[in-house]
Image (cartoon, rainbow, N blue to C red):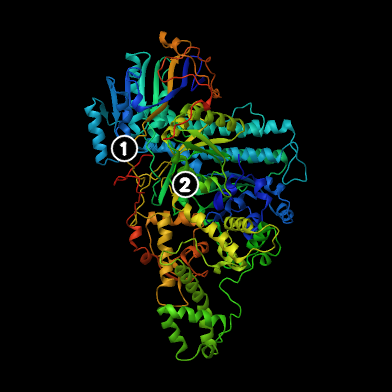
């Protein structure tokens, strides 16, 4: 098993979380001590909270400052009805608030299990979640399930032409300030027309590896390939890697391996996570592993971005991140789950790794993996 | 990873290429010799793709050594300085801006932001100095190589040790490579310190402490001159000049640009600068710098690319043919017997066909003929000249009308283009002499050439041209424009808040198309715009992005003209159904009255429900 950011005094580990149908989530098995969601305009923002059934006592849904059509108010009301507290700690206030929230929970309930729904977070918020986890003090012991509900497939929209803003997703994940002669983009593709191309052009990156999402709906991949045919075919022919939306752990392993190879070769990896937000989560986690040598970029049409009323596909997937002082088991129940046996994510080059987990925490979502191909995303 | 192989812009971008790669197919334009001949400060101004980065990189010893063409010997003889290349690119600027963004509000934070900017530039430039020195004294070099010097290891160590304190480097630093790496490390450390300074809740006292950090105390000018002095003494070339080649100057934060001004004021004749920047970057890059006084080398498309030696040579190189005219046959707008107006001539046939369905043309023709026949009218030299000037427009209207008619009531596909734009002369014209367009066109043309064939048919040429034009056109749907600079977020003033690069191009292109095809027929059809809109900052940004991408060409105003003139790059002619000529300028302000630039159009597919609000879910 692998470590996210570890040293002699602390273990930070990432585990797979078995993708499941939302309708089949076992409320008892998936009981959490705390839940973080986001109030969004897309109905998908409620899917995981709803799927979990039982809302923990400490449950917060953080709002967004902008983009509030009527469906946003519906979400707001829905969370209130479920007894979920809403918070306005948005934008730059989110990181310090989330850090404090985690610390408070960890102090009151050592070894607490927390669910974080990233489905309707924007990329800076996802980056802030990862940063907070990576920077928590050494003595904190928590287990965080980072969950994602893929959106129901709908055909790609024709986006009006726009002005693309390109920025690192956060200062923490902005990479190392330096004279970069050979940046290589690891670009997650979505089906927004022209965005991937414009991002590469804007950053003047000539070498890129494209990550193609394979979602629960087979039309999704076709749509992604069609939208990006200019990038993937013809004279351009950037090489591609497929990843399964429902298997973020595998995606992390693939991304991490590539980053490791690039760094070893003297290249500067820059991850541009377009497409499903689960790829943004994977990108941020991998960049945190290699912090500060990998940058994660956000490409956005900002206010011209089309807000699409996304529904969930009926699935939930994710990864589990555990934090604990080194050599300190989470609790007795840890011995009940075996470590996931996936190809190891590379060691952080700048920090020494704690020993491999012998006894990871018990999590209903954790599975023993026999390789990436053991489970295929369902087509339906 | 894969080779640079990604379209007309980045595929041929020298930015990410090593000097040796740049040298491989370098064809020196005239401006290269202007840069080479003097150590005086110079500004290289030109749109993206015109070859600014290539020019600067080709002044580096590594490039000269790798250049194996005949002209390389001249360059070796005449370049009397050591080039030091500093690249400030979009990616670097994005990282810096992200870190600098929280540093605003009070003077302390602004001071901190400026101090970081100056230090960042200093470490970037010093790392480049160390790299240049390392290349000059590389142990595997010899005297045949450009500006190589034989420096004993002990002497090199002594030299590095002597400059280390001014560079805030470790006193035990032994080699130039170590020195360069330390500068990179300092740059990285600077980034971490910036992140700390920008963290929420940073108190004044903490910020003051950060400002006292040693890494911020670097003095660029002192460090650079100390280095030049020590190196020159060590190699016995006391007065040898070093020239800082700063690429894409506009991407440097304002404070770093100011630093350059300060260092220039403390002028040391051994340190000079050559700077490249894009046109229409406003006045911001010049603030606090002496750039206004520098010699300006403006790279602009050649008036007549077919007579431009650089364009011709590059095409020949790219097509691997010394006779591209044999390969690219096609008469384009010309026809056999172009001066013949007899009843059975091709000209007469075309005129007759167009007059049959185009009432605007018919009115013009009746006026010109004045009751005479075409053949008789053409005997009058003045009328003949007028007819001759009108014929390309006649063919343009006619051919596009045929395509529309062929579309059987549906709208003509923009990809359906007549074979008017073919032939070497027209392809030269569409390239604008821009290396990226030339290389993209050459690549597409060679792709269309049947195996072992010596020629490329007009139809195949049209396919190649259309492919390149549409590929770039599609890319304009998403263009990166960032109005912040050095962490300073700027909200540009504008009367056109909904303007985007593609909307501007479409507006201007459609305006010209209407003038060309639907308005009263005139051989002097409009084809350019007087830039009569001033002080609209967002329009400038959008315009600049198009100039930057080579999509719009700026023609500087003449001595007596009130405004600059802009025109669409000729590559757009097939898309907007235009002639390959400049044409009469019209008011830009008038063209921008189109509602498209004032109200954005939002569309969605039937399967998706979109919400009628501005959003940011990225």
Instruction: Identify the subunit bearing mark 2.
Output: A
Residue A329 picture quarter: top left
Q: Give me the C-alpha separation between circle 1 and circle 2.
A: 23 Å
Which label belongs to residue B72?
none
Report x, y in % for residue A173: 46, 32
Disc 2: which residue: A227
> What element does badge 1 sit on?
loop
Number of numbered discs on residues: 2
Residue at point 51%, 87% (across, down): B374
Q: Nearer the viewer, residue B331 or B286?
A: B331
> What element does badge 2 sit on?
helix
Residue A343 picture quarter: top right
Report x, y in % for residue A176: 51, 33
Mark 1: few/some/many CA within 10 Å (<14, 14-19, 20+): many
Q: Nearer the viewer, residue B549 or B517?
A: B517
Report x, y in % for residue B421: 55, 67
**Residue B587 shows up from this direction:** yes
**Residue B255 shows up from this direction:** no
- Residue at the far top: name it: A332
Disc 1: which residue: A42
Q: Quadrant for the C terminus of chain A, please.
A: top left
């Amino acid at each position: 098993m692998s470590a996210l950011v570890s040293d002699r005094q602390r273990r930070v580990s990432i585990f797979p979380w078995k993708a499941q149908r939302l309708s089949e989530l076992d409320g008892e098995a998936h009981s959490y001590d705390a839940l973080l969601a986001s109030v969004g305009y897309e109905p998908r923002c409620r899917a995981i909270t709803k799927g979990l059934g039982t809302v923990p006592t400490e449950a917060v849904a953080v709002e967004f400052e902008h983009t509030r059509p009527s469906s946003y108010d519906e979400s707001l009301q829905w969370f209130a009805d479920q007894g979920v507290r809403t918070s306005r700690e948005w934008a730059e206030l989110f990181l310090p608030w989330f850090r404090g929230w985690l610390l408070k929970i960890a102090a009151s309930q050592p070894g607490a299990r927390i669910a974080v729904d990233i489905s309707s977070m924007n990329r800076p918020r996802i980056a802030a979640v990862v940063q907070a986890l990576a920077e928590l003090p050494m003595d904190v012991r928590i287990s965080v399930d980072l969950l994602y509900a893929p959106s129901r497939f709908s055909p790609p929209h024709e986006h009006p032409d726009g002005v693309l803003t390109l920025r690192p997703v956060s200062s923490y994940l902005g990479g190392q300030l330096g004279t970069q002669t050979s940046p290589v983009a690891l670009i997650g593709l979505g089906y927004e027309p022209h965005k991937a191309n414009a991002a590469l052009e804007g950053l003047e990156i000539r070498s890129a590896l494209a990550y193609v999402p394979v979602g629960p709906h087979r039309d999704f991949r076709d749509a992604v390939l069609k939208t990006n045919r200019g990038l993937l075919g013809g004279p351009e022919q950037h090489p591609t890697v497929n990843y399964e939306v429902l298997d973020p752990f595998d995606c992390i392993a693939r991304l991490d391996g590539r980053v490791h190879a690039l760094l070893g070769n003297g290249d500067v990896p820059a991850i541009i996570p377009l497409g499903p937000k689960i790829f943004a989560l994977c990108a941020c986690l991998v960049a945190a592993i290699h912090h500060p040598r990998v940058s994660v970029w956000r490409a956005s049409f900002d206010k011209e971005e089309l807000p699409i009323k996304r529904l969930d596909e009926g699935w939930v997937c994710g990864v589990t991140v555990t934090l604990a002082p080194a050599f300190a088991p989470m609790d007795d129940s840890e011995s009940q789950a075996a470590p996931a046996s996936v190809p190891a994510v590379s060691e952080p080059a700048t920090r020494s790794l704690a020993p491999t987990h012998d006894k990871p925490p018990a999590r209903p979502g954790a599975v023993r993996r026999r390789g990436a191909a053991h489970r295929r995303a369902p087509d339906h | 990873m894969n080779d640079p192989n990604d379209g007309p812009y980045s595929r041929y971008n020298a930015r990410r290429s090593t000097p040796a790669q740049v040298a491989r197919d370098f064809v020196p334009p005239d401006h290269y010799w202007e840069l080479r001949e003097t150590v005086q400060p110079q500004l290289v101004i030109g749109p993206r793709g015109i070859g600014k980065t290539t020019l600067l990189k080709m002044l580096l010893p590594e490039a000269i050594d790798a250049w194996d063409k005949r002209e390389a010997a001249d360059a070796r003889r005449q370049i009397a300085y050591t080039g030091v290349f500093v690249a400030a690119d979009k990616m670097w600027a994005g990282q810096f801006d992200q870190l600098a963004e929280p540093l605003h509000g009070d003077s302390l934070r602004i001071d901190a932001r400026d101090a970081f900017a100056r230090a960042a530039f200093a470490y970037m430039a010093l790392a480049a100095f160390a790299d240049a020195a390392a290349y000059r004294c590389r142990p595997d070099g010899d005297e045949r190589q450009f500006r190589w010097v034989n420096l004993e290891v002990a002497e090199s160590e002594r030299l590095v040790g002597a400059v280390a304190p001014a560079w805030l480097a470790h006193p035990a630093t032994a080699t130039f490579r170590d020195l360069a790496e330390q500068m990179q490390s300092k740059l990285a450390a600077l980034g971490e310190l910036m992140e700390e300074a920008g963290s929420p809740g940073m108190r004044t006292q903490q910020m003051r402490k950060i400002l006292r950090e040693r890494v911020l105390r670097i003095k660029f000018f002192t460090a650079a001159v100390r280095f030049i002095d020590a190196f020159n003494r060590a190699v016995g070339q006391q007065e040898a000049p070093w020239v800082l080649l700063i690429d894409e100057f506009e991407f440097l934060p304002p404070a770093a640009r100011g630093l350059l001004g300060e260092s220039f004021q403390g002028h040391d004749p051994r340190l000079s600068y050559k700077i490249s920047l894009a046109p229409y970057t406003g006045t911001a890059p010049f603030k606090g710098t002496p750039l206004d006084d520098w010699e300006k080398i403006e790279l602009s498309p050649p008036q007549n690319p077919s007579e431009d030696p650089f364009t011709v040579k590059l095409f020949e190189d790219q097509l691997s043919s010394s006779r591209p005219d044999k390969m690219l046959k096609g008469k384009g707008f010309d026809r056999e017997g172009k001066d013949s107006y007899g009843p059975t001539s091709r000209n007469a046939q075309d005129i007759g066909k167009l007059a049959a369905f185009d009432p605007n043309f018919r009115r013009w023709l009746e006026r010109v003929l004045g009751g005479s026949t075409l053949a008789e009218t053409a005997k009058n030299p003045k009328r003949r000249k007028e007819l001759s000037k009108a014929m390309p427009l006649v063919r343009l209207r006619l051919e596009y009308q045929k395509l529309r008619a062929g579309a059987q009531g549906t709208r003509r596909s923009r990809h359906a283009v007549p074979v008017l734009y073919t032939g070497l002369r027209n392809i030269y014209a569409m390239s604008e002499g821009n290396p990226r367009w030339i290389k993209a066109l050459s690549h597409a043309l060679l792709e269309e050439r049947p195996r072992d064939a010596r020629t490329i048919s007009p139809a195949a040429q049209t396919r190649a041209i259309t492919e390149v034009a549409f590929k770039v056109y599609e890319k304009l749907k998403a263009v990166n424009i960032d109005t912040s600079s050095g962490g300073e977020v700027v909200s540009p003033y504008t009367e056109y808040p909904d303007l985007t690069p593609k909307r501007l191009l479409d507006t201007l292109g459609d305006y010209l198309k209407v003038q060309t095809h639907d308005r009263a027929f005139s051989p002097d059809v409009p084809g350019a715009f007087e830039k009569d809109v001033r002080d609209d900052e967002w329009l400038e940004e959008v315009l600049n992005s198009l100039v930057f991408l080579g999509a719009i060409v700026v023609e500087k105003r003449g001595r007596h003209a009130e405004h600059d003139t802009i025109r669409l790059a000729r590559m757009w002619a097939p898309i907007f159904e235009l002639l390959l000529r400049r044409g009469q300028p019209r008011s830009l302000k008038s063209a921008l009255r189109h509602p498209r630039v004032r109200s954005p159009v939002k569309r969605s597919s039937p399967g998706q429900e979109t919400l009628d609000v501005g959003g940011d879910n990225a």
